[in-house]
């Protein structure tokens, strides 16, 4: 855990780093943010040693210090990023870290142009002003040059930062919605890891530069915007990423937790640099997360090994082997080696509906269990335990008369017909 030491504005951030207990932790704030360009760094002082961090993280720590936050958790510093074993161990506790924080700050950046600050101010005004966002006419004629020559969603200028009573209200509202679109287009909302961070946090405060707004208040104000005539397609499409985050939070906070496969699908448009993050960024907030956090799912394993082990875990949970007969054409993972034929590709953007249904089914009466006996955990071979109930002697066709049968070896060599015509009654 970080202890941020006092300092004058603009001075280098100084802090100490110490071990802490999450069972009975001292009050702390958790930081949710985008790392930013890993090649663009600046130094802070940690335990009297210079420590390079991304500029965006340093800006966030400066802001926390100015707010009087003394104890904070930030992943880039509090997890040894060079130690894969420690990183994999700590990733399993992400949900606990954010859920036990007193407050989570969602840092959006410094907002050099003032555009995002304008959007936050606009949302705050909507919470105080309960009048409807009506379709107002322009109060000037002719239209100003910027309106006729500039696309409606061009970046607004800092000069329109505050609402002025003598300005055209239509122009001001359109400018506010342009700023809101820029707010919704921020890279932060597209980041997959923030889903768990925001969903698990008891309280979240959105912070951009010196502007702040509570997450619930922000959501309420955006709901008012959705009902207005200014909420056109460009704004609606930009809202999809934030909407996904808010949906996850609502489901988690109401105990309507998704299964991992459902969560992967619901977040399919979110971004992460490592394919393994499609699993681990969601595992803590999934209803079957505790069942799946086994030795099979370790962050140190390659993505293709994790995919195989998810299939083993699903078979263990459902007690059913139906997954292994799904089409091999589903196994089309980009940038990964070819998967075994018995596992679907859980990291596809769109997992086929029949595969999802098999993975989401409740445990039946079958008691098939994966067996790892004599096989390494990273093996691409699936071995299962079952019960011997008899021997197949021959096979008959449901489409032919009941007295027609084939030797098993003959049947296996037959091509599969493209169509089957049933005999007349």
Image (cartoon, rainbow, N blue to C red):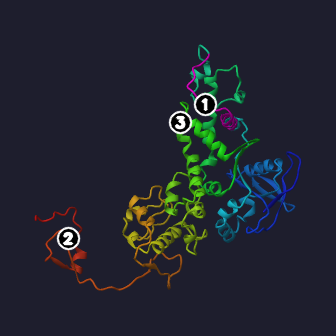
Name the secondary structure under disc 2: loop
Disc marking residue 333: none
Q: Magenta span has 124?
A: yes
Q: Earlier in the sequence, mark 2 or mark 1?
A: 1
Residue 155 picture location, percent across and down = 63, 32
Q: Are marks 2 and 1 in contact (CB under 8 Å)?
A: no
Bounds of the magenta segment: 120-139
x 52%, y 33%: residue = 232
Vertical relation: 9 (above or below) 378 = above
Name the secondary structure under disc 1: loop
Q: Magenta span has 293?
A: no
x 66%, y 70%: residue = 89
The quarter of the image holding the C terminus is bottom left
Residue 208 picture location, percent across and down = 72, 43
Residue 376 picture location, percent across and down = 53, 80
Query: Is residue 218 visible to us here?
Result: yes
Q: Of tags 2 and 1, which is closer to the observer?
A: 2
| In the image, farthest residue toward the top | 141
Q: Of tags 3 and 2, which is closer to the observer?
A: 2
* Circle 1 residue: 154
Total numbered badges shown on the rendered structure: 3
* Circle 2 residue: 398
- The answer to whether residue 352 is left or right of residue 33 is left
x 40%, y 73%: residue = 321
* Circle 3 residue: 234
């Amino acid at each position: 855990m970080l202890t941020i030491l006092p300092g004058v504005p603009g001075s280098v951030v100084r802090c100490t780093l110490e071990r802490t207990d999450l069972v009975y932790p001292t009050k702390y704030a958790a930081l949710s943010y985008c790392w930013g360009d890993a090649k663009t760094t600046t130094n802070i002082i940690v335990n009297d040693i210079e420590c390079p961090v991304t500029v965006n993280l340093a800006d966030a720590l400066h802001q926390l210090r100015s707010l009087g936050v003394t104890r904070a958790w930030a992943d880039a510093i509090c997890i040894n990023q060079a130690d894969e074993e420690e990183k994999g161990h700590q990733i399993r506790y992400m949900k606990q870290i954010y859920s036990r924080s007193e407050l989570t700050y969602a840092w959006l950046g410094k907002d050099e142009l003032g555009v995002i600050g304008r959007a936050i101010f606009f949302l705050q005004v909507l919470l105080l002003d309960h009048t409807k966002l009506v379709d107002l006419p322009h109060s000037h004629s002719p239209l100003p040059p910027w309106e006729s020559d500039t696309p409606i969603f061009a970046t607004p200028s800092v000069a329109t930062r505050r609402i002025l009573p003598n300005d055209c209200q239509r122009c001001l509202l359109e400018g506010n919605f342009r700023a809101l679109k820029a707010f919704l287009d921020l890279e932060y909302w597209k980041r997959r890891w923030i889903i768990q961070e925001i969903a698990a946090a008891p309280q979240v405060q959105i912070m951009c530069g010196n502007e702040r707004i509570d997450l619930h208040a922000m959501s309420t104000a955006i709901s008012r915007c959705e009902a207005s005539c200014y909420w056109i397609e460009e704004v609606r499409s930009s809202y999809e990423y934030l909407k996904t985050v808010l949906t996850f939070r609502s489901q988690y906070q109401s105990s309507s937790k998704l299964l991992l496969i459902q969560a992967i699908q619901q977040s399919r448009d979110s971004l992460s640099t490592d394919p393994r993050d499609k699993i681990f960024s969601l595992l803590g907030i999934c209803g079957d997360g505790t069942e799946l956090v086994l030795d099979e799912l370790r962050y140190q394993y390659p993505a293709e090994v994790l995919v195989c082990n998810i299939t083993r875990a699903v078979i263990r949970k459902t007690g059913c082997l139906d997954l292994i007969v799904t089409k091999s054409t589903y196994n089309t993972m980009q940038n990964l080696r070819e998967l075994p034929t018995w596992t679907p590709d859980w990291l596809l953007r769109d997992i086929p509906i029949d595969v999802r249904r098999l993975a989401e089914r409740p445990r039946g009466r079958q008691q098939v269990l994966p067996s790892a006996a004599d096989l390494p955990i990273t093996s691409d071979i699936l071995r299962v335990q079952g019960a011997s109930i008899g021997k197949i002697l021959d096979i008959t066709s449901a489409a032919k008369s009941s007295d027609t049968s084939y030797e098993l070896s003959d049947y296996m060599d037959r091509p599969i017909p493209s169509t089957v015509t049933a005999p007349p009654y």
